[in-house]
Image (spheres, helix red, strand yellow):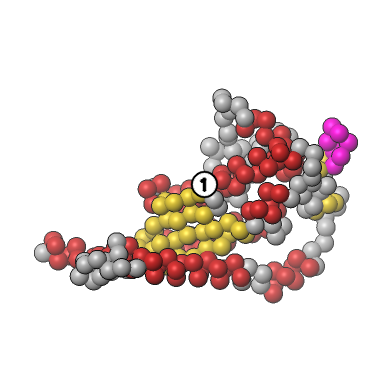
């Protein structure tokens, strides 16, 4: 009876192979002025890695899972195994939708998170058929379906409503283009007399701290005058 139930379970679509992919990485990293360029390149590269970790941790914590559900993370890509429930799928989709809104408001159109998920059985994840026998390319079919969904989300990122908003967005008071990244933000006057946005300032200032062996990173929103890395769901965490 136990074996029968096990075989039945492995043929049910009880799992979801979910993935997100951060696009615009190269453009984001290399969009900077020559002065202190190496500092910002270092900081931006580390920031993107931490951003992926931040998003993955937020998703699994909201669903109630652990790091064991993260199969791979690196290079702006993350693959995770989730339960095939409406709650889990909605949390995955909504979290990344909110993150994309934050990225748009923060870095304009430089960064975007493409995402998708594919429902699958335990046997399919193991390259097995319904009888538990080895079946070639079973997992590969899931992966290809997942890639199609991710690519479709990237191609459809600019909806008519979003394009209208971007083309009719009015700058706020005191907003100007940053001399480093080109984004329209409220600028700060630096010691060299140039004006830059707070993000470009922080990317340059954080670089020195990143080289220290005893450095400790704490996500906080208490002191905006100190250099820091900001993330979409910082308010939910303090670590």
Q: Which residue is depicted at the point 67% across and 30% down?
A: 208
Q: Main secondary structure of the magenta part?
A: loop
Of all residues shown, which one is farthest toward the left? 1
Magenta span includes 14: no
Mark 1 secondary-structure assignment = helix
Is any atom of residue 32 visible in this view?
A: yes
Q: Which residue is depicted at the point 83% across and 36% down?
A: 190
Left or right relative to 171: residue 136: left
Residue 184 coordinates in the image, percent (x, y): 80, 53
Q: Which residues are magenta?
A: 189-195
Residue 82 coordinates in the image, percent (x, y): 39, 58
Magenta span includes 191: yes
Left or right relative to 168: residue 11: left
Of all residues shown, which one is farthest toward the right? 193
How many marks are shown on the rendered structure? 1
Left or right relative to 75: residue 43: right
Of all residues shown, which one is farthest toward the bottom? 160
| Residue 217 quadrant | top right
Q: Which residue is depicted at the point 51% across and 59% down?
A: 20
* Quadrant the N terminus occupies: bottom left
| Residue 224 quadrant | top right
Residue 32 coordinates in the image, percent (x, y): 76, 47
Left or right relative to 161: residue 139: left
Badge 1, how many Cα within 10 Å: few under 14, some, many 20+?
A: some
Q: Which residue is depicted at the point 82% across and 55% down?
A: 172
Position above or below: 102 against 50:
below
Q: Which residue is mark 1?
A: 53
Position above or below: 180 against 164:
above
Residue 54 coordinates in the image, percent (x, y): 53, 47
Q: Of residues 177 and 102, which is closer to you in this image?
A: 177
């Amino acid at each position: 009876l136990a074996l029968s139930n096990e075989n039945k379970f492995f043929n049910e679509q009880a799992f979801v192979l979910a993935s997100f992919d951060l696009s615009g990485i190269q453009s984001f990293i290399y969009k900077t002025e020559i002065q202190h360029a190496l500092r910002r390149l270092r900081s931006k590269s580390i920031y993107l890695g931490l951003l992926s970790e931040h998003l993955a941790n937020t998703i699994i914590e909201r669903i109630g899972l652990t790091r064991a559900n993260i199969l791979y993370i690196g290079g702006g890509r993350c693959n995770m195994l989730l339960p095939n429930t409406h709650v889990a799928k909605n949390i995955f989709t909504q979290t990344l939708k909110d993150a994309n809104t934050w990225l748009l408001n923060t870095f304009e159109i430089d960064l975007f998170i493409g995402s998708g998920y594919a429902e699958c059985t335990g046997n399919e994840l193991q390259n097995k058929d319904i009888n538990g026998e080895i079946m070639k390319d079973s997992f590969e079919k899931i992966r290809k379906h997942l890639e199609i969904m991710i690519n479709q989300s990237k191609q459809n990122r600019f909806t008519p409503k979003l394009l209208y908003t971007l083309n009719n967005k009015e700058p706020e008071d005191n907003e100007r283009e940053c001399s480093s990244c080109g984004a329209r933000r409220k600028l700060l006057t630096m010691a060299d007399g140039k004006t830059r946005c707070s993000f470009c300032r922080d990317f340059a200032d954080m670089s020195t701290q990143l080289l220290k062996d005893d450095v400790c990173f704490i996500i906080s929103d208490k002191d905006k005058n100190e250099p820091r890395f900001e993330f979409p769901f910082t308010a939910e965490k303090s670590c």
